[in-house]
Amino acid sequence: MRNIKIEIEYDGTDYCGWQVQNSPVSRVRSPRKRSIQETIEKILQKILHEKIKLIGSGRTDAGVHAKAQVANFPLKSQIALARLQEGLNALLPKDIAITGISEAGPDFHSRFSAKSKVYSYTILNRLHRSAILRNYAYFCRYPLDLNLMRREALTLVGRHNFWAFCASSGRGKNPRKSIKRIAIAKRNGLINIEIEADGYLYNMVRNIVGTLIDVGRGRLAKGSVKKILLSRNRPSAGPTVPAKGLCLLKVKY
């Protein structure tokens, strides 16, 4: 049995997220959106004529994008990987692309073998909105103090309990995570907040970004982020920013 590793780039706008949704389709409501996982699995099964179950490095929510999501799956077929990648990219929707494919060792697991993941969040920070960037950046028209945001973000670097930045529905996980770095840069009206950590709680990045925006706008005073972190109280932190600005950049092994 071969262990196949793939790297996936996708625009998450029209998907319910990475993971297959098990809830039935309602007769009253409109049909649910597809997931990235099930969309790729269906094409794999069409090409390979065997049932395929993708193991993703982690979930991304509805509307979240990825430049390099990683997944692996067991494969009986001896098909050439270059041919498999070509076939996948020919049949997949235009908003999903397989950017890499290789045969991994038998012990490789896309989730459990990962050392860290890098996410970026994009903020369009100018007076007028963008039609082109509407699905890829959060529009914030207010001036933001980037230097203060950078200083406050340093509080979050290291191993901490991140309950204050976790949605209530994600409270079943271990709240202690290690943020390795947070970088904030601005160019041509776009602010990019890049975070690398060994793991994330539900909505953790989007809640951190919402809090840093409140810092930049002057809604939260100097030293507030440390107090919020120590409080372990979600309501004390800033709002959850929209999913559309979030992108999984890289999974490190």
Image: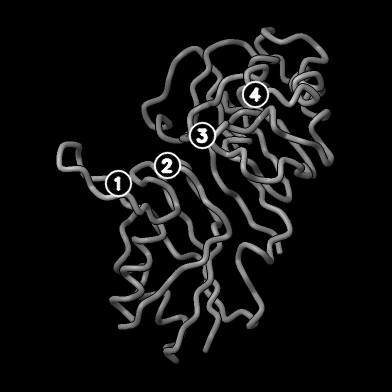
Q: What numbered label is drawn on residue 62?
A: 2
Q: Is residue 108 above or below residue 213?
A: below
Name the secondary structure under disc 1: loop
Seen from the viewer's position, the closer of residues 123 and 23 is 23
Name the secondary structure under disc 3: helix
Q: Residue 170 at what x, y percent from top left?
A: 58, 39
Residue tagged 3? 245
What amino acid is at disc 4? Arg
What amino acid is at disc 3? Gly
What amino acid is at disc 2? Ala
**Mark 1, mark 4: which one is toward the viewer?**
4
Picture residue at 31% right of the left edge, 58% below the top:
93
Between marks 4 and 3, how big is the CA–CA gap? 21 Å
Badge 3 density bin: few <14, some 14–19, many ≥20, Cα 10 Å: many
Badge 1 density bin: few <14, some 14–19, many ≥20, Cα 10 Å: few
What amino acid is at disc 1? Lys
Badge 2 density bin: few <14, some 14–19, many ≥20, Cα 10 Å: many
Residue tagged 4? 234
Horizontal side of 100 relative to 22 (left or right) equals right
Seen from the viewer's position, the closer of residues 204 and 9 is 204
Tell me if label 3 and label 1 are in contact, CB under 8 Å. no
Between marks 4 and 2, how big is the CA–CA gap? 21 Å
Residue tagged 1? 33
